[in-house]
Amino acid sequence: MNCTRKRLVLAGGGHAHLSVLRALARQRPDIDAVMITPSTHQTYSGMLPGWMAGHYSMAECQIDLRPLAQAANAEMILDQVTGVNADLQRVTLANGTQLDYDMLSVDVGGETNLSWLETLGKRLLPVKPLGGFVQRWQGIVADAKKQNNFSLIVVGGGAAGVEIALAAQHVIEEQASLATVALIASERGLLPGHAAGVSNRVRYLLKQRGIALHEAQAVGAEDGILLGNGRHLYADTVVAATGSTPPRWLQTSHLALDEHGYISVDSAHRSISHPNVFAAGDVCARTDILMARSGVHAVFAGPVVAHNLIASITGGKFISYRPRKRSLYLMATGPKHAIASWGSFSATGHWVWRWKNQIDRRFMNKHKSGDSRYD
Ligand SMILES: Cc1cc2nc3c(=O)[nH]c(=O)nc-3n(C[C@H](O)[C@H](O)[C@H](O)COP(=O)(O)OP(=O)(O)OC[C@H]3O[C@@H](n4cnc5c(N)ncnc54)[C@H](O)[C@@H]3O)c2cc1C
């Protein structure tokens, strides 16, 4: 490394950092870039339910970060960030190494919120980190096939919980297993933030597929779930799709955080306390607007963060990420069928799946092929 050059550390290889790597490859700013990622591959969550349902191979759902990092001339360190000291401009890795930076960009996503469920021990399967979920899922399907009356419960009434419950039921039915699947949404109900038309379509589908829906607070017990209404549900496996919490190590980072512990950023996705730190995706919270934590925003904020990081190096002007008022969500429902949700609009059918498949594959091709037509 040239000692006079500045160092940019990219923590995590999430959705936004895919755009950052591509921008570094195109513009080659005068900086030493280092990406810290626990895995050489980024698994695309939008295609995970399709993988569970058997429509995609895992290779189709993963982006190899190595060619992107190579094209960006970024060193890749296979490890996890376990601490940041933003005052000292230093990150600490799981192997104990400390790395000083001039600029830091954080896109490590969130962790699954497991509060209330930890008592479940080995029965608990958090959906994130995705790597852990992917490793265990096939074993669970095999158990469901072998064991009589296998019971799978998905906790989480958001889009991810719905997609996982429907994909699980589909694969279990295809394997002619006698397993049952249930979905637990909290008292906040099914699909909060989506129009009533969307949740009605999902309720109808759940009923049609024999997936019991419970709308009550779930608490983990040794052998299943206790509901807020006093009912006990036995479970062999409980999948937690309970939304994300920020990494705990942010607490000691000296970065300004919101009341939940996410990195507070402005419209340029720059930390409001440390101007040399940027953050995008599920790990950050905008101070100027309310923005849902979703892959859509992580993806669309990516080019903005890329632009602003390079502007910080070259002295250019910053730009803002202005999310659209409504985001399009396409939820896979098991077979090659999906539900679309966009504001008050909803639709369902095999054509929605084909639409989703086309969008997801386009996203993957963009980052797999390095095709500049997409920039
Ligand atoms: C089943 C499922 C389906 C979903 N479908 C959709 C959808 O259709 N549309 C949508 O908008 N959203 C969807 N979401 C939500 C979406 O996955 C997240 O909002 C999105 O992944 C956030 O992107 P991100 O870049 O913040 O983080 P991530 O995509 O989680 O990427 C973070 C990366 O950082 C790495 N990392 C984590 N910790 C560290 C660390 N300490 N150090 C270094 N690296 C680290 C991780 O390995 C990962 O590669 C879905 C979620 C799930 C679970």
Image (tube, rainbow, N blue to C red):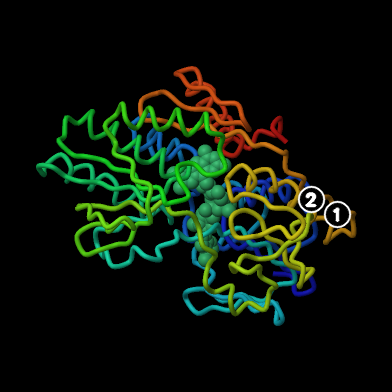
Q: Which of the pair 39/126 is nearer the observer?
A: 126
Q: Position of residue 258 (x, y in %)?
A: 66, 67
Q: Position of residue 103 (x, y in %)?
A: 73, 67
Please indicate whether residue 256 sits to the left or right of residue 331 in the image. right
Please indicate whether residue 159 sits to the left or right of residue 20 in the image. left
Q: Which of the pair 155/311 is nearer the observer?
A: 155
The numbered mark at residue 318 is 1
Q: Total of numbered circles in the picture?
A: 2
Say what secondary structure mark 2 lies in.
Answer: helix
Q: Circle 2: is it few (<14), some (14-19), or many (20+) Cα within 10 Å?
A: many
Q: Position of residue 61 (x, y in %)?
A: 45, 39
Q: Amino acid at mark 1?
A: Phe
Q: Is residue 16 above or below residue 84?
A: above
Residue for badge 2: 307
Q: Are marks 2 and 1 in contact (CB under 8 Å)?
A: yes
For image coordinates 74% across by 53% down, the residue present is 289
Residue 45 shows up from this direction: no
Instruction: Tell me which label, 2 or 1, sits earlier in the chain.
Output: 2
Q: Residue furthest bottom?
A: 88
Quarter containing the C terminus: top right
Q: Is residue 20 above or below residue 248?
A: above
Residue 172 shows up from this direction: yes
Quarter containing the N terminus: bottom right
For image coordinates 55% across by 57% down, the residue present is 109
Q: Nearer the viewer, mark 2 or mark 1?
A: 1
Q: CA distance from mark 2 to mark 1?
A: 7 Å
Q: Amino acid at mark 2?
A: His
